[in-house]
Image (tube, grey):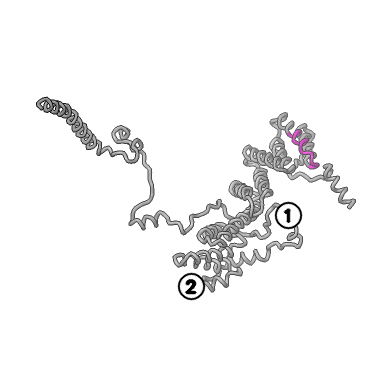
Amino acid sequence: MVAIVALGLLTSCGLRRKRYENPITKETQQPDKVLFDKAINDIEHGRYEVARLTLNTLINTYDTSEYLAKAKLAVADSWFREGGSHALTQAEAEYKDFILFYPTMEESAEAQERVCMIHYRQMDKTDRDPSQALRAEDECRQLLVQFPNSKFAPRAQQRLREIQEVLADSEFRVGLFYHSKGSYPAAANRFQGLADHYSLYSKADEALWQLGDAYSQMGPRFRDKAAQAYARIAKDYPLSGYADLAKQKLQDMELPVPEADPVAYARMKYEMENRDKASLMSHVWGIFKKSPDVRAAAKSGTPAMEAYRPSIPVSIPTPAALAAAAGGGTTDVTATTITDSTALDTKPDARQSTPGEAKPADSGASQTAASSNQAAGDNQNTTQPSGKKQSKKKKTKK
């Protein structure tokens, strides 16, 4: 206990030294090199604020120094080592600036990997907010696209598999929720997108099994789609616990059973042999961990290089189906540019008319009717006084 307390005190006092990853080994007594070495020593001992002050002095004083790029990278590394939400945000901004100013340096790939790790370390569990996992996926994918030949690419590829394991598990949980509630079209849509996009997911075979069951519950119209899901289990996941059940389903449906893919068989065997085993303490401390469990993530295979986009459920009619039901018509709305500049002057504007108002073509008839009514009224007005005079004359005769 005394040794543990002493080690904690040494760590809190900054006496523990964690070596810097990108030092400059050139031996020289140039002033800029002296400042750089002093800042690196402060970073290694946890004096991050002092190190940043020294590095900013180097950058502002020796703007033509050969250590300028290394100094800017060291500023970002100091924020990354300091940790915390504020420091990591500052580190991401500094790394992005470094990549922008020095895109051809080898350290730019490392800076991009650090940006990926910033969001990777802040990922939540699969049943919580996936925003950090989505950001980490984008940044790791950016490293593979921008720096495909870097020595950091294989490590970023594995990180991408682990991130997509978390995202796929989130989709799987949502699909199970819909399936348990009887919302089979919504469940089928989730499982279909998961199986198509995240084929390396550790529970992709179970997702396909649930997909086939959801299609089966939706009626005979989706029988072919259910058969496709069962066939994919038998072909692409031959070592799965659902493989025999899927084959039996296909036999009951009187459909052919596909042969197992040798490449898929070898990959699945490799994954089962190299999957990380959960320790006894991991089950105890797992409920207290904020980060997700990625032990079941794939160790081989190419991860998805495009963002996941949910598809439209099959129960929703497509425009083509609506057009066929309407007798071959079209349901698309198109817009064209008016080339005739006099169209607005010669043609009536439909926006000026109100519902129930007479059409422009009927305006002449309505005016004629109005004039006839007015004429009739005028005739009545002109004959009324003469009638009164005649009545007076009759009274006079009497």
From which residue to which does the magenta span run? 44-55
Kind of residue sitting beneath label 1? Phe
| Left-right relation of 24 to 377 | right
Measured from the top left, where is residue 77 in percent x and y? 72, 41
Q: Secondary structure at mark 1?
A: helix
Residue furthest toward the front? 398
Q: Secondary structure at mark 2?
A: loop
Q: Nearer the viewer, residue 147 or 383?
A: 383
In the displayed structure, 178 sits above or below 373; it is below
| Left-right relation of 31 to 377 | right
Using the rendered image of the protein, determine whether residue 299 is visible from the camera's viewpoint. Answer: no
Measured from the top left, where is residue 191 in percent x and y? 55, 60
Q: Which residue is mark 1?
A: 288
How far apart are the two marked residues, 1 and 2, measured between alpha carbons? 47 Å
Residue appearing at x 23%, y 34% in the figure:
370
In the picture, residue 46 is in which quadrant?
Answer: top right
Residue 86 located within the stretch drawn in magenta? no
Kind of residue sitting beneath label 2? Met
Residue appearing at x 68%, y 59% in the figure:
295
Residue furthest toward the right? 2
Using the rendered image of the protein, determine whether residue 360 is visible from the camera's viewpoint. Answer: yes
In the picture, residue 347 is in which quadrant?
Answer: top left
Q: Which residue is mark 2?
A: 253
Measured from the top left, where is residue 84 in percent x and y? 72, 43
